[in-house]
Every structure is written in C-alpha cells, then in structure tokens.
Image: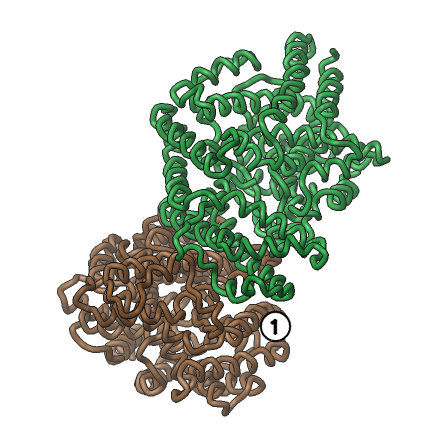
Chain colours: A green, B brown
Amino acid sequence: MCDKQPTITGFDDSPDATAALPGMPAAVPPAGVPNPKADLAALDELERHLFAHRYARIGMECHGGTIDPEAAAADRGEALAILRQEDQALLCSPETGALLDRLAASQALLTPMQAAQVRILQRDRASMVDVPPEVQGAFTRLTNEAEGVWRQARASDDWSSFEPYLDRIVSALREIAHYRDPGADPYDVWLDEHEHGTDRSFYERLFGQVKDIVVPLLADVRASSRTLGRSPFAGRFDASRQGELARDLLRLEGLDERKVFVTSSEHPFSDGLTSNYVIVAGHVREDDILSNVYTMLHEGGHALYEMGVDAALDRTSLKGGTSMGMHEAQSRFFENHVGRSLAFAPRLIEVMARQFRGQLGRVTPGQLHAATNRVEAQPIRTEADELTYPLHVIVRYEIEQLLMSGEAHAVDVPGLWAERYKGYLGVDVPNDARGALQDTHWAGGMMGYFPAYALGSAIGAQLEAAMVRGGMDFDGVCASGDLSPIHDWLRERIWRHGRSRDTPELVLDACGEPFSPTRYTDYLTKKFSALYNL
Amino acid sequence: MCDKQPTITGFDDSPDATAALPGMPAAVPPAGVPNPKADLAALDELERHLFAHRYARIGMECHGGTIDPEAAAADRGEALAILRQEDQALLCSPETGALLDRLAASQALLTPMQAAQVRILQRDRASMVDVPPEVQGAFTRLTNEAEGVWRQARASDDWSSFEPYLDRIVSALREIAHYRDPGADPYDVWLDEHEHGTDRSFYERLFGQVKDIVVPLLADVRASSRTLGRSPFAGRFDASRQGELARDLLRLEGLDERKVFVTSSEHPFSDGLTSNYVIVAGHVREDDILSNVYTMLHEGGHALYEMGVDAALDRTSLKGGTSMGMHEAQSRFFENHVGRSLAFAPRLIEVMARQFRGQLGRVTPGQLHAATNRVEAQPIRTEADELTYPLHVIVRYEIEQLLMSGEAHAVDVPGLWAERYKGYLGVDVPNDARGALQDTHWAGGMMGYFPAYALGSAIGAQLEAAMVRGGMDFDGVCASGDLSPIHDWLRERIWRHGRSRDTPELVLDACGEPFSPTRYTDYLTKKFSALYNL
C-alpha cells in the first residue's frame, strides 16, 4: 500500500468549520421532519465529495514519492492538509452526524450497500470527530517535515538528526489517541486504526505463537548442514530490461494492464484511486534481480485486490481494501504462496529469461526455489525471507509499544534495535541506516502499522489452506501460469467486498474458521523443514 | 499550456450550493459591522481552499493525457467536475461576493498584492456566478465524453462520429456565454475568457494586418528560386536517446530541473502546479528529431514562465501566467526567436550531437538554421514554420466564428477547412485526421483559444525588439548558450507578476509601447526575405 499518512483528521468546533461542503446542508432535512428520500440523496452527495477528495489525495500522495520533483514537497503537503481539513469538516459536521444517525436507525430502508456505507462512514467519523483540527494540522505538518529529515538521516546514517522528530511524533500520536479515546491505551488506538478490532492482546497472542515456533525453527535452519545458494542470480542485470521485466511480471500475475500506472520509488508501494486505476511503484537494483521480481509480485498482489473491488463501490467510502492486514494478506499471498512455490518457478523463469536470456536461460526451477527461499538472517525487513520476516515485524512492534507507553524514548531506539535483532535473529545491526532508519513508516507518523504485515502473512497461509481444502489444485494452478482460479476464489470471497465487510468476517466466511495463526506456523514449519531437511 | 477545459463553472442558487466551504463563513463578519482584519483573514482562507483544489486539479488534468491509464478517464472526469463544483460554490456564494466587494471598497487597507487578488477573484467570480451548475456540469460531462470520441475519430479519420459532439459543444458554449453576458456576442465572451480584454474586432485588426503581409510574402517565398533543405536531419533517431535529448534541451534552455517532471503525451503541453513544480510533456517521433527539439523549446518556454512567477503568489489566485496569449508569447519566443536563430544554432547542434554523434556530428549551424526555417505549406498546425503558422490559426478563427454565429455547423467544417487551407496556404487537405480533427481543443470545449497562439507570436516579436532597443546583445546572448540575461529581462518585466497584471499593461511597460502587430510582421518580412533572398 501507499506509505501515506494516517487518514485521521481533526474537527474544528468553531461554527465555520462545521459548515458542511456545498451541496450537503440543504439535503439534510430539518430535524423532526423524517424524510428518508432526502437523507439518501444527502448520503450520495456526501459520498460524491468524499470521492473527489479521495481521488485527488491518493494520486497526490502516490505521486509524491515517484514522479513529483523534490521541490514540490511543501506545496503538496499543504494542499493535502487543506483537503484533509475539508474532509474532516464535511464528515464531522453535526449535520452529517445527525444524517448518519438517522440512516443507521432506518436499516429497513437501506440496501445492504447503503447500510455498509453508513456503518463505515460512522466509523470514519468517530475516528476524527474529537481530534481538534489544530492538533491534526500540526501533526500533518510535523510528519511532512519529518519525512524529509528521515530521508536525509538515512542517507547520512545520522540517527541523532531524526531522533527529536521521532519523540515529537510519538508524543503527537499519544495526544491524538487520547482525543480519540481518552480511556484507551494509545498504542491500542493505533493498532485499531490500521486493523480494525485489534489491540495489544490480539498481537501478543499472535506474536507469542509465532515466536514460539519461528525462533527455534530458525535455530534449526541455521544448524542445518544444508545450504541454499543464490549464485545463479548473481551479476548485474540491466535496469531498463528489469523495467520491462517488472511489467511482464504484472502481466504474468494477471493484472489488467489497461488499469495500471507502473512507476518507481525509493520505497515500493501500490495503491488504487479506484478499481480502474492502480499505481504500482517498484524499485530496480541492478545487482539484485530477485528483489525486483518479488517486489513486483508483492505490489501486484495489492493491485489485484484494489482492482478486484466491485466497481459499484468505486465512488463510495467502501472503495479499496478493508484493512492493512487483509491487504498484506493479498500481497504476501502472491509474493510467497504463489511466487515462492516450486510449482510457479518455471513460469517465473520463463518471464525472467525473456529479458535476460544470456544470464538466466539455463536456470532451473529448483535453483530459483532454493535462491528465493534461502533463510538468511540479515538486517533489512524488506529483503527478508518468509521465515525471518515476522521477526523483523516483532522487533518493531515491541519497540513501538515501549515508545508509546513512554518506557523508551527515541534515544533508546538504536540500542533496543541492536539488542532485539541480536536476540531474535542473531544479527549484528551494521548501522542505523540499515537499522532503525530503514523504514519510512515512523517518519510518516505511522505506528501500529507494522504488525499488519505479519498478520497478513498469517491470513495468507490460512487462505491457501482454505483453497486447498475447498478442492483447488493449488500447485496445478501455479504450474499452469494461469492464476485466474486463484483470482476468482479471492475476488468472490475477499476482493469484491471492499470495505463493506471487516477482516474477521471475511476470514471466517472464506476459510470456514476464525482467524488463527496455526495455519501460518504449520506452513512455515512444513515448508522450511522440507527445504532444510530438518 | 495544458490542454484543459475552460475553468468556467456554474453557480447553483439553491441554498445548499451557496454555503461556502468549511472555514469560510464564520470568517466573513456579519454585514454592517466593518471588520477589515476579519475580512483579510477570510481572504486568506478563501485562497487556501482555492489553492488546494487548484493544485489537485492541475495535477489531475495533466496526468490525464500522460501517465493515467485510459480506464481512469471517467472517474477522473467525475472527480474533476466535483472539485470544480466546490470551487464554484465557494467563489460564487453571496458571502464571498460580499467579502470581495467590501475588500474592493477598502483599497487603502490592502497591499498591492491583496488588491490584485481581490480584483482577479472578482473577475473569476463574475465569469461563473451566472452560469447554472447543471448547465456547467452537463458541459463538463459532454467534453469528457467528446475527448474520447475525438481521439477515436482522429485515429480512424472519421469526422462523422465527432460531428454531433461538435454541434453540441458549440451549442453549449453559446448557452454558457449567454448566461455569462446576455448582451455580448458569444464568441466575444470566449475570446475574452482566454485573453482578457480581446474580442472579434481586436482579432480582425490583428489578423487583417497579418494576412496582408503574410499571404503575399508566402507567395514570394514559394516563387523564390532558393530552397532550404532538411536532408541532414533525415533518418531514424532512437526514441530513448531522444528522451535524453529532451532533458538536455530543457537544461540548455535554463530550466531548473529540480522543479520539473518531464513526461510525454499525444499532444505536448506544459503546465505549472506552482512555481516549484512544472510538468512538461513532449512527444517523440523517431522519424522527426526536429519536432522533438522545437516542441521541447516551446514547452520549456511555458515552463520558464510558470517557474518565473514570484513564489509569494504560489498559493493565491495570482499564481501562473496572466493569459494564454502571454503564455504563448513566452513559448514561441524560446521556440522561434531563440531556437530558430542562427546565433543559437551551434548550441543546439552541440546538444543534439551529444546524443547522436554519428548522425549529427557534422551538421553545420547553417544547415540547422535552413532546415528549421524552411517554409513549407502543409496541413498540420503544430508542424508549421514561423511564416505559415498564423495562417493555420486564422483558418481556425474564421471557422470558429462561423460556428459560434450559427452561419455554419459541424457538417460544414471539413469543406470550410479544405477551402481555407487551399486559399491561404495553397494546401490540399489530405483527410480529416490531418485536417479538422488534428487539434484537441474543440473536443475539450475550447473555442476562442487558437487566436491566442498568433497573438503570442506577435507579442514575442515585440519583446525581442524591446530587448534589443534596451541594449541587449540578443544574438550574443543566444550564441553564448547562457540565456540568463533573457530570463532576467522577462522575469523582471513579465514572469514574476503572475496574474497580478494584465497583458496590455505588461506589454506597455516591458516594451514602452502598446501592443501592435507591426513588430511581428516586420520581423517575418525581414527574416524570410533574407532567408529566401526576396
């Protein structure tokens, strides 16, 4: 997904900011005179304005790290802040609140889609209605600035320049969380923001089980006499041909090219403006072709989800993926369950060899499978293999928790980082640039987002298990190179619903069982035991 | 400039649409209680919202023909229409009208910049306040659709499919013009929209003088025994190297690369979101390197103007160029007066030979000068030489006038086109694709825009004459390859003022004389008499 700011925005209780956008107030009938038809028209009008702003904002956010010149950052940040302020004023006005309450109380008059719209709009409204806009505005400006500082800090491996910004961001996140829910733990507020319904106790259970399985499994792998090599993929791979390869991979994955803008950014991402327009940003390194391959499969998975949402939801608040965890479930499903399977390896090699016949024409599926599943404890999350990946996430989760509770401050982070990487992964962190400065999320004001990556991996495993239980010849589909049976399965059960259904409900209906990390830990155990002959 | 829709939008007199955007109304003090400080704060608030929407809209419009997938067109069009509707509601509300009136009446309290803002905002408001939003909305949707139809029609050389759209567009333009100014001729309304202060009588005088000089001059050129060749530039020029060349040319022209996004589109354009962010879209054809060169110099001229506007105006309605004619003056100045001069030719050859050493390493300045100034009556406006260019514009102006007056209809256009091209240029129009379907403007709802191209050429000639009269060694500056003296001259007198000053005032102050086409016709006569030994 696009590394964008949290969408929370504040609400000004001065009369000016409560005035809704043009086209709204008159469509809201005077209290006491029930007029459901007018209320439904007002709902449509509300969604129209939110749609136009969302369309504009997502584009602006995505273009920020890709095509926009650096010099545009300040103006773009200010324009985004103003558009967010308008959305907040529109959604948080007392009139809109009353409208949504009336509609929620008239379920019998609503189509299922309208009922879902009202529910999601009420949730979105609740998340911002109590945050003062000057607090939210200050936060937006702080993170705009912090992103530039972080970029510099990472480039020059200078933690100390970023340190004060991290403290200010943590403090602002605690303040905003307090406005949103004064009785709640601040970190719980942000976990819930990125994955509705989750909190620390949810992730404690998930991560507890993952650690219990993965840490000893990793030790066994490291002790194993078997080693997997990457040497067939060594060498330099021309950047412009890798650009062609990136497009070929999206095609292989089954994306409708007519709806994609492929670009590049320092930090790969994808996001959808509507189901008709998805932006996929990769990042090519000439010395690492596999990074390009798996980045594209990952981002392509996000793109498939965005494109798979029912087009009828495009111009409503139900547009797009339902949660960060479910989004990562799709991306990591295509990256790992499809992309790192032995069955799909011949198809990937075909595509890679089309651009690099001389260098990769004789690579075997087994060599690709070994190279891309080699377990290697190393310091960078986005380069992690499937087994060590959740440990990278857990490090961040634990440090975020300490920061949000006040038990640690920014100055402590490099030490905590080194200690945890050593403890969980056995890795010596080489420096802060390849340590606590590697990710953009904190600079962007996002805490509580990382856990969704691991949750997504776990859901992905559960989805594959359900496909197989339901009778799909999963390996056969991968081997055929035509992934449409997988698309159809996911579109029907997950994608098309957009935000109209929450993750737990989607998992339950798709898999016939509630969310559980056991499929994931079983999958990891089976896969890596076989690979490493444990 | 970006080939975008006219920015006129309508105004809904229902109470909902008159409610201004959040943040506005309370800043407008109750009538009868003068509060200049609150009025100035309300002006700032108004500008903030207009800035955010403008920033979003310009980006969306520019990305439409460049990076966006085709499938995004309908959603983008709808989002743009809604954003325009919001701007219209904001600017046209009675509260905003009263605010601007109060500020206009308190000139003593305003800085010169604030006074200019109020004047321009009042002008923008007046142009849309009387147009019903349903009329404007229908027009926006019509032109969104028409642009797709036009693209297809041009590709398949099928005038008849576009014909009904052109009639509907003309009829809508007449209707909207009538709302804007019931007493005015509709074509005059649109001429004024694109170039404030102009009307048919202005252009009759301009084009009369141009025709009187150019038509006989063209006949002399065609009768001349001297011919200028383009053979040194024949051949195929690799597209990706031409992409590099495009960037090199913008650098040579003196653009600050850190503020530009260079892209490509079917129809080249440039536009600025702010002075910090300009988009330049070229179009590379492997069989025509000179087209790339002069397109980039032209679009780069627009970009220099946008970047040269005082940064203090960036987030106000004074942002950007003051008129279409003045914008074309800048682009055609750099394309023709600089780019097609003999003095600059060695610098251009240097840059071209950097990418195409083998093909162009031995070309001489004289050969480039001849090739790029060869007079050739042919059917395509954007490929025209300097001498025939205004005749292409006059054809369009005359046909637009007939359409807007109802003396002709869309069905008559191909015939009128053929007749006028034969009459003024001696050219047989090969088909409609290379005839009346060649330009995107009408499909986008723009009539009255073409004349500004010729006006710009005329102003450009007046600017060069003024520089020389003021003591600039114009050829010496071009020969040096460092164009900063020209930038400085134009920035000081034209660019930095943005929309705060109108074209006639800028021309008078910069040139010490009012606008006149004589410098232009003198320039053409002198240049082409010398080239063709007349």
Q: Secondary structure at mark 1?
A: helix
> In the figure, residue A103 lies in which quadrant?
bottom right
Please provide percent x and percent y for residue B342. 28, 63
Name the residue furthest front. Answer: A32
Say above or below: A309 vs A109. Answer: above
Say above or below: A391 vs A262. Answer: above
* Residue A353 visible in the shown view: no
Q: Residue at horizontal 49%, vertical 57%? A: B60
Please provide percent x and percent y for residue B88. 43, 68
* Residue A104 visible in the shown view: yes
Q: Chain of mark 1?
A: B
Decide which of B438, B418 is in the foreground and name it: B438
Name the residue furthest right. Answer: A471
Name the residue furthest left. Answer: B471
> In the figure, residue A172 lies in which quadrant?
top left
Decide which of B63, A366 is in the foreground and name it: B63
Q: Residue at horizontal 53%, vertical 56%? A: A96
Decide which of A72, B108 is in the foreground and name it: B108
Amino acid type shown at disc 1? Ala
Q: Quadrant of the N terminus of chain B?
A: bottom left
Please provide percent x and percent y for residue A454. 62, 28
* Label 1 Cα neighbours within 10 Å, binned few <14 / some 14-19 / many ≥20: many
Q: Residue at horizontal 63%, vertical 44%? A: A321
Q: Quadrant of the C terminus of chain B?
A: bottom left
Please provide percent x and percent y for residue A175. 42, 34
The residue that mark 1 highlights is: B153
Decide which of A376, B364 is in the foreground and name it: A376
The number of discs equals 1
Horizontally, is B373 left or right of B441 in the view?
left
Say above or below: B122 vs A229. Answer: below
